[in-house]
Amino acid sequence: MGGRPPSFQVMESFRAFTDNAGLFDLGFKGPPYTWSNRQGLSTHILERLDRALVTDNLLSLWPLMHLTHLSDLGSDHRIILLQLIPGVGKGKPSFHFDHRWCQNNDAHAIVLGEWQVSMQGTPQFQLFSLCKAVRHRLVEWARMGTTNSARQIRELRSAIESERDTFPVNWEVIQVLETQLAAAYLQEEAYWKQKSRTNCLQVGDANTNHFHRATTQRRRQNFIEALQDEAGTRHYDEAAKGNISIRFFEKLFSSNGIPPYFLRECFGNPPEDYSCSEFLPGCSYYT
């Protein structure tokens, strides 16, 4: 901000360097500029001279790392703080349907087999029970690793190298393995596209690295670094943040936690005596 316009030739050279090295800007928290010439308004210049460039491999080791621009008190440069935060431990994973299962005959057979089981109870209970049974069977089947495309890629690459080291080389076997490897790469790309929730690019265009990076960035954006309790203390520990969240929602959905304007917005102006209400016969105030 201020001063002469930037040199586009220098900017293009820097962009080409980062692309060739596989680097990308980590981003930052705090004020946008890191340097100031500390002069008057007419000649005041602000620039972002400092930035953190990382690779996909580094970000996979420290998925929650971030850069913060701190104070520039007494200096023309802001202090920049790079915090290396490892990935937090995951709780019990929720069920997610893997799009790769749509192309797998074993997955089709599991769904058809479980769906034909007779269930007792109301239609709603039968539907719930069937979906639960299908989900459990798919999870058990997936744990066997039959759809682990990353492992398949490693095994197929190793098999191809082994075949090439033999003499004479059996090119027919290698062609079969290479066909299977191409299919495994496509499955891996589809897997990361689903996890990245990126819809602007198509599977099959060698966008696996893009999908992987988008997944990591989404996790960083969704990460809750700290929560503040009722006393105003900030907590960074995962267990403490979980307890704060539980207490907040327990209070929110208790009779004393829901604000009156929320009730009026949802239910209008309720009658004073619910026991006489034609809308809620036989009901009384919840305490």
Image (cartoon, helix red, strand yellow):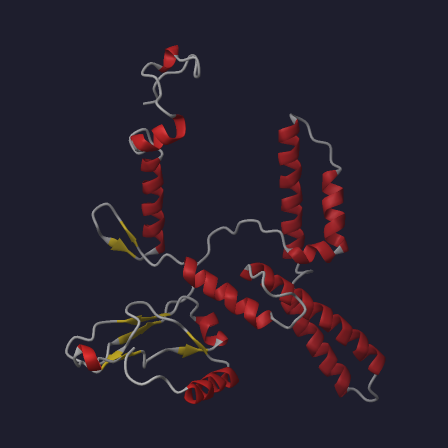
Instruction: State the image coordinates of residue 192 (x, y, percent, origin top left).
Output: 59, 64
> Residue 200 versus residue 141: which sits nearer the camera?
200
Instruction: State the image coordinates of residue 110 (x, y, percent, origin top left).
Output: 73, 47
Instruction: State the image coordinates of residue 120 (x, y, percent, origin top left).
Output: 68, 27
Is 200 displayed left or right of 87 in the figure?
right
* Image quarter of the C terminus: top left
150 w.r.t. 101: above or below: below
Residue at image point 67% right, 37% down: 130
262 w.r.t. 229: above or below: above
52 w.r.t. 102: above or below: below
Residue, far front? 42
Quarter of the figure with residue 31: bottom left
Is 79 displayed left or right of 54 in the figure?
left
* Image quarter of the N terminus: bottom left
Is 99 displayed left or right of 1 in the figure?
right
Quarter of the figure with residue 54: bottom left
Instruction: State the image coordinates of residue 137 (x, y, percent, origin top left).
Output: 66, 47
Residue at image point 30% right, 33% down: 259
Residue at image point 46% right, 52% down: 91
Quarter of the figure with residue 8: bottom left
| Residue 88 seen in this snapshot | no
